[in-house]
Image (cartoon, helix red, strand yellow):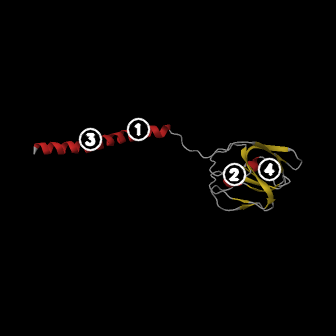
Amino acid sequence: MDQQLMSNLLKLNKVVFPTILLFFIVLISCGDSKTSKSNSSTYNGRVVIPEQTVHFLDADMEQISSVEVQISDDVMERSQGLMDVRELPENHGMLFIFDKEEPLSFWMANTPLPLDIMYVNADSIIVSIYHSTTPFSERGLPSGAPAKYVVETNGGYAITHGIEEGYRILF
């Protein structure tokens, strides 16, 4: 019987010891989670990469301001726009370029920043402006007139720089 008891204990040790060892390895690796969380980078949203400059011109064709823009000129880029962009430098934005001039409509779904949205026709004239739009809103913001371009900037940019409907863009 002593031999059978010893045999059972050896079998038990082959299962229990690795299980206990595995438990402590997992416990030790999880115990350092505070350090690893503080060292890991957090996702801060997408980043706008400027590719071109858009100049705003007043009624006398005088330049009144400029923004560095990322170009959005295909279906995939236009559908994403500034969604998930959480930080936008002051004089940065996005220029949407469409194939043809037609009535357009944008919305703010998945867009965490208030934006100014300026619709521009094929003659580069600003036909409508939405000032400081509401983040995450799914309400449509129609152009009100045919447009071929849309310039998005930080909310308040148009008012701060005196940009009005009827003014032009140059890029």
The C terminus lies in quadrant:
top right
Mark 1 / mark 2, whichever is N-terminal: 1
Q: Residue 86 at x, y = what percent?
A: 62, 47
Instruction: Measure the C-alpha gap from mark 4 to mark 3.
Output: 74 Å
**122 on left or right of 142:** right
Element under disc 3: helix
Tag in front: 1 or 3: 3
Residue hosting label 3: 17
Of marks 4 and 3, the one in the foreground: 3
Three-letter code for the amino acid on which mark 4 is drawn: Ile
The three-letter code of the residue at mark 2 reads: Glu
Q: Which mark is residue 163?
A: 4
Q: Could one spot residue 119 in this view of the protein?
A: no
Depth check, front residue: 3 or 119:
3
In the rendered structure, find residue 32 and report the number of the disc placed on it: 1
Q: Secondary structure at mark 4?
A: loop
- Work out whether residue 27 or residue 105 is closer to the camera in this orientation and state it: 27
Task: Write down the residue under mark 2.
Answer: 77
- Residue at image position (78%, 46%) is 161
Which label's residue is closer to the chain start, 4 or 2?
A: 2
**Res. 141 in view:** yes
Left or right: 11, with 138 as reference point: left
State yes or no: discs 3 and 2 in contact (Cβ < 8 Å). Answer: no
In front of the other: label 4 or label 2?
A: 2
- Dot 1 amino acid type: Asp
The one nearer the camera, 97 or 58, is 97
